[in-house]
Amino acid sequence: MPVGELFLGAFLQVLFDRLASGLILAFARRERIYKLLKKWSQTLRIIQAVIDDAEEKQLTDNAVKLWLEHLRDLAFDLDDVLDEIATQALMEKSEGVQERSGKIWKFIPSCKDCTPGALMFKKRMRSRIEEISTRLEDIEKTGNSLNLSQNVRGPSNMNRLPSTSVAPHVYGRDKDKEEVSKLMMRNQENVSIIPIVGMGGIGKTTLAQLIYNDELMTAEFDLKAWVCVSEEFDVFTITKTIFHAVTQTSPESKDLNLLQESLKETFSMNKFLLILDDVWNEDYDKWEAFLRPFLVGLPGSKVLVTTRNANIAAMVGSVPSYYVNLLADNDCLSLLAQHALGKSNFDEHPNFKKIGEALVRKCRGLPLAAKALGGLLRSKESPEEWKDVLCSKIWNLPRENNILPVLRLSYHHLPAHLKPLFAYCSIFPKDYEFDTYELVLLWMGEGFIPEPEERKTKEQLGFDYFNELLSRSFFQPLSSTGSHFVMHDLINDLAQFVAGGICYKLDEKVETNDEYKIPEKARHASFLRHEYEVFRKFNGFYRVKETLSIRNCRFISKLPPTLGDLVNLRHLDNSNTDLLKELPVEIGKLGSLQSLPKIVLSKVGGLGLRELRNLEHLRGTVAISELQNVLDVEDAKEASVRRKQEIEELQLTWGNDTDDPRNTRLEERVLDVLQPHENLRKLKIEFYGGVRFPTWIGDPSFSKMFSVTLIGCTKCTSLPPLGLLPELKHLRIGEMPKIKHVGVEFCRKRAADLPFSKLVTLRFDHLPEWEDWSCFPDEPQMQFPSLHQLTIFKCPKLVTVSPLSLPVLRELDLEECSMVLLESLCNLDSLNYLKVESIAGLSHLPGELVQSMATIEVLECCNCNDLLSMWPNGVSLQHLSHLRRLVVADCSMFVSLGEEELQLPCNLEILELFRCASLTSLPTDLGNLRSLRELIIKNCPKIISFPEHGIPPVLKRLEILSCKALESLPRDISNLERLEIKECPSLTNWSAGNFPNRLKKLSVKNCNKLGPVSGEMFPPNRRITLEELSIWDWLNFNTLLQQVQSFSRLTELHLSHCSGLEYFPEQALPPYLRSLSVEHCSNLRALPMQIRNMLSIISLEIRSCRRLKTFPKCDFPPNLSSLRIWDSRKLKPLSHWGLHRLTSLREFSICGGFQELQLLAADCGGSSSWQRLVLEFRLKLLHMSLQTLRLYFTLAADNDSA
């Protein structure tokens, strides 16, 4: 391994900074070692000058490589010595030891410094310093003999494009997106599992993101969730993540069964889309256990799985896998140009194009390689520099650890100051989600961020460095959040490769009952994702120097007291450790600690508040819980929270056990003395048992505080004066049953300033006794000039409200509130989204509110059982010109959308009506809505027909589900692209006129009275564009089936529960059909003979068609890749099936219902291309040879297709 790539040049700079530290220099002068440290610095400067040349030569010169290894070991040992000196100096300073004079080396101490600890330190350090000096001289001499040149690499060109210019562009995946979208839009009877397969870096996740974020998918599915699975397939953790994604709440239960039951309730009522990204699990039992709650989803629900492993795809998939191919060179070239030049082509940089084309060929169609190479080239401004990259020796080096040459090249060309920052990221497991601030703090703690020369903070400089790495594609932003990132697996491999043994992930090495030691050279260790706490595993952490992460170890319940021996520990990340209920008291000794996000207080034995007094350097987020265990206010005073100036986010939590007696007065005094420093930015207080809040909460001296959350303070009768906080942007008040009035004390203002002048989001929830909200009697309105989002949830008694002025409000969500609150709202000129739910007494939206919503885009009314219509009589809807989506759901008394003349705004695009039991008719002006694209009606049992004037001509999607009384479809559906009719037992007639020639998808299910389509609907020479046809339990399907052969674009045909189907019409199948599925057609006797000649068919599925005569009767389609035969009878022996001729077959599944099946030897015809074989019999197995078993169960192990 090229050890020179271990960022030595940058690490030497860290040593220079430490050697220049005031604390170390003062100690060195006191102990008469100042000249020695100065000599170390001079020698290291000489060595630093040749590091660049050494990094180049060590690729081919083993002597240089070995020299760099020795230099690295020395550098880290020297750093350890400086660490111990700094720690000793800090201890002496804190103990008040005065500076002492002396003429000799002070490791022979004065009498007043003769403590055993000091003597041991001085003795140990004398030996180590002498050893360092000797080794440093040897390394300098050896380096001189290697003929290394100084400064061979020029300074890095910093005139690169800003990272913001590298937008997430995707090239060459339009066809892939189209094909996968077709699979996603198929409405199968059961939940479908769709695997996307491809090699690492090929763009599986990117393709899944394109699908997930598509507007059509948002409209198609009621619920969506995305989970990054990675190598550890933890059923509980993944299920918990999905639960949080779909409910926006954290599950209370730790029991998998209870959690899955809760999910079943949610999914059974919804059509959902679930993305499982980066799946590695091959354990079918785990997969089956995970899948249970998702099988109850509504028909058409989809689970999309991305994986590199074709065997996994074959195991989980319910449809044939979709294989992602390499990019074409022209698409790769566009991707390279985008990341290198900020453009999709070379039109403005023609001198670079030829070299770019040569470089693209090095990428071999891999998008990740093209992005990384483009990120590298961003800092190269001349064709000559690009040519240097093309001619680099690294392209020809052997591939160590499967690291792509282009990735090694990208790292090699990183500026020296970025190399240690990137290599440090190897401490993160694959697919670990990290946020920018978290990573920058860790970098700072390691000394990687120097003191800024400009007027910047270290944090700002760290963010600059982060953005440089982001611009070079070393990090990937998550689509769901703006500040969270991941590293691609191959990038993570690169980080581990260049870091060597410096960063060590114990969770990748530890088995449940084994003990491991961290290697001697490791400087950073993480233990992030192992499920079960095994106390002795922590023996390995005794050598940790600076950083220890046990983040997300949810079963760890205890930490060892020996953590207190890690005197140089700067970061102990114990966040998201649910079962960790106490910390060892010894943590209070860690005076260098900067990160300790979770502090759990104990009554006796463990860490208490008092022990926090020595943790002066805590910064970032600090969450202190179990504050009810504080028995003496003096402990809170000793904690000296206010002296900890770098804490930016503080969470203070008491226990929420209502049966536990609480000392109200003590809790008030404790919270009072826990006042933080004025630098605090976020404050959260939970389950506080006092009656009143201390005066510091809301004090305007907290000029940086932008977020406050007060939850579960059940005894508080009033709120603090939060209106005084000048920078407050986010506020949540919840679960306070004693709050009855919110008034002047809450909205207090400073001088002429408005209270809450910068507040952006405001949420009140679970305030069951809240009655009035009024701030200033002499002012007509409460003003929130910057408020964008207002949520009021479960505040049913709020009936007295001063008028609210909300000039820039974007989102308003009201649930279980009174009508009075709605009527108090005015000046909603900027509102885009309004949701009202469970509002008692609401018969229609207040007229004043409707008139003020000129910018509304989405309007949802849910579970309002008194709602009769949307709008009051006489109100004009002309000003609702921006309304695009209207949803009415679970409103049992709802009968109409408004007056007959004008019921809906003219620019409406999506109308959804769900479970409105009293709705008898649709708006008469429905046909006049010239922008309406989608109409979805579900469970409206009293609707009989569509309006006389039909539906809008621009309508693209019509979905009707469980409308029991509906008798006919609307007039003129000729422009529809998607039509789904399900469970409408009274429906009898199709629309008059021709069959919709633009229709791409048609689904008919459980509509047994629906008559046949007329042959007149298919005039000669009229082109039909139908691509997907699904028929479930429709008696009169035959006429449509006879027309299928003329549907030249039809690619998918699914027939289910069609008991009248005995034989297919002659030449019934269209020429380009790709997938044929026939299920539960109990009278089907034979498949069409033409199937054997159809080159287009790649998937064939036959389920529970028990009257099929002697299957198969003819040859299979020659290009078949997936064959599934389930629960059928009268099968020929497999040796007669001709499977050996199916050279493209990847998946072969036989399951259930056979009386007898004889499997012969290899002449039955297996194929080496098979990647899945399922044999699930309830039969007598007559014969299967060992040779056949080997053939069937070797699932394309040598195939490179994945």
Image (cartoon, rainbow, N blue to C red):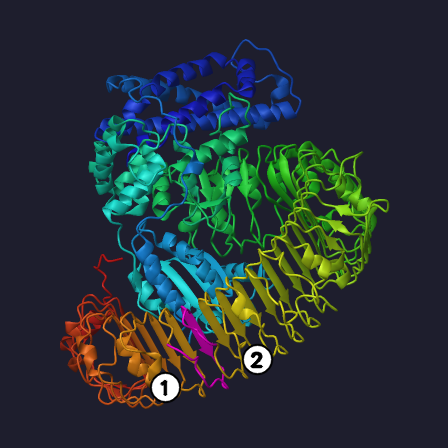
In the rendered image of this protein, does residue 1150 appear above or below residue 108? below
In the rendered image of this protein, does residue 431 appear above or below residue 843? above
Task: Indicate the amino acid at tag 1.
Answer: Cys
Task: Indicate the amino acid at tag 2.
Answer: Ile
Q: Which mark is residue 1058?
A: 1
Q: Which mark is residue 481?
A: none
The answer to whether 1159 appears left or right of 528 in the picture is: left
Label 1 sits on a secondary structure element that is loop
In the rendered image of this protein, does residue 62 appear above or below residue 1134? above
Q: Quadrant of residue 47?
A: top left
The answer to whether 1122 appears left or right of 104 in the picture is: left
Label 2 sits on a secondary structure element that is loop
> How would you rate the neighbour count of disc 1 (Cα within 10 Å): few for under 14, some for 14-19, many for 20 or more?
many
In the rendered image of this protein, does residue 398 appear above or below residue 30? below
**Residue wearing tag 2:** 943
Between marks 1 and 2 in the image, the one whose residue lies nearer the viewer:
2
Q: Main secondary structure of the magenta part?
A: loop
Residue 521 visible in the picture:
no
Where are the magenta residues, as a range? 971-994
Residue 974 coordinates in the image, percent (x, y): 40, 72
Q: Which residue occupies the foreground of this view, 1181 or 915?
A: 915
Q: Which residue occupies the foreground of this view, 73 or 346?
A: 346
Q: Quadrant of residue 178?
A: bottom left
Residue 562 coordinates in the image, percent (x, y): 55, 42
> How would you rate the neighbour count of disc 2 (Cα within 10 Å): few for under 14, some for 14-19, many for 20 or more?
many
The answer to whether 1118 appears left or right of 759 in the picture is: left
Q: Is residue 987 on the magenta stretch? A: yes
In whole angstroms, how far apart are the C-alphas of marks 1 and 2? Answer: 27 Å
Residue 567 visible in the picture:
yes
Residue 391 coordinates in the image, percent (x, y): 21, 31
Q: Quadrant of the N terminus?
A: top left
